[in-house]
Amino acid sequence: MMQIEILVEEQSAEEALRHLLPGLLKSRARAKVINLGSKYKLLKVLPERLAAYRRRIASGEPLRVVVLVDRDDDDCERLKAVLERMATAAGLSTKSSPAADGRFVVLNRIVIEELESWFIGDPSALRKAFTSLPKIEQNAGIFRNPDNGGSWEALHRFLKRHGIYKSSFPKIDAARRIAPHMTVEQNRSRSFRVFVDGMEALLT
């Protein structure tokens, strides 16, 4: 069975994926999420890790790799180009630069601009996670365009107005509470949809 290793930069992404992956994989592959602790460290160690993955794949291991990072304040196209160059330098095909048969082993995906945009993209999950929330109008405020920027601050302000997380915003706790209720098919975050589509392509 295919083994997928997913490299992430923080624990909240690890928590979210732990709940989302079963619905995405549907028993078609096994997955391991590896939290590198920060975006800086992930990018620093990525070339070495990709080289190690290349050796494992060359030995016949049915391995695929997903790199998932937040855009933050980076230019999306430049950040994606950096990830693609690292994979190419390691001799690995990507979704953007597949092998001659169209297959690829590395999926590079960027969350625009932070993981919380995925949560904003699923108002139903928010209401299930925080039952005191009123009905959410999907075409108003931060929900009109979940990938509009300032995701975690925008989500915190919204929740704080309704008496939730009144001081700080605990990203890990939020991921742990919201992600179990997320529905893959109805999420309106474009970066989430691109991630899901990429995972589907990787699994085929």
Image (spheres, rainbow, N blue to C red):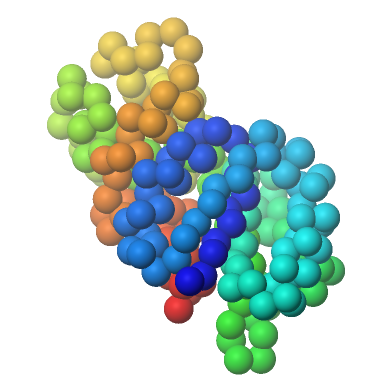
Quadrant of the image occupied by residue 93: bottom right
Q: Quadrant of the C terminus?
A: bottom left
Quadrant of residue 36 within the rendered picture: top right
Q: Nearer the viewer, residue 18 or 152?
A: 18
**Identity of the residue furthest to the bottom in this view:** 101
Q: Is residue 87 above or below residue 118?
A: below
Q: Residue 41: image x %, image y %?
A: 76, 39
Q: Residue at x 46, y 37 (%)?
A: 15
Q: Is 199 placed left or right of 55 in the picture?
A: left
Q: Is residue 143 visible?
A: no
| Residue 153 position (above or below residue 143) | above
Question: Is residue 29 something that shows in the picture?
Answer: yes
Q: Position of residue 108 (x, y in %)?
A: 62, 61
Q: Residue at x 55, y 33 (%)?
A: 11
**Residue extending furthest toward the top:** 167
- The answer to which of 154 and 107 lies nearer the viewer is 107
Looking at the image, residue 38 sits to the left or right of residue 29; the answer is: right
In the rendered view, tell whether residue 141 sits above or below residue 171.
below
* Vertical relation: 88 (above or below) 189: below
Which is nearer the eye, 24 or 195?
24
Rendered residue at 55%/61% (across/down): 4
Residue 38, image x, y percentages: 69, 35
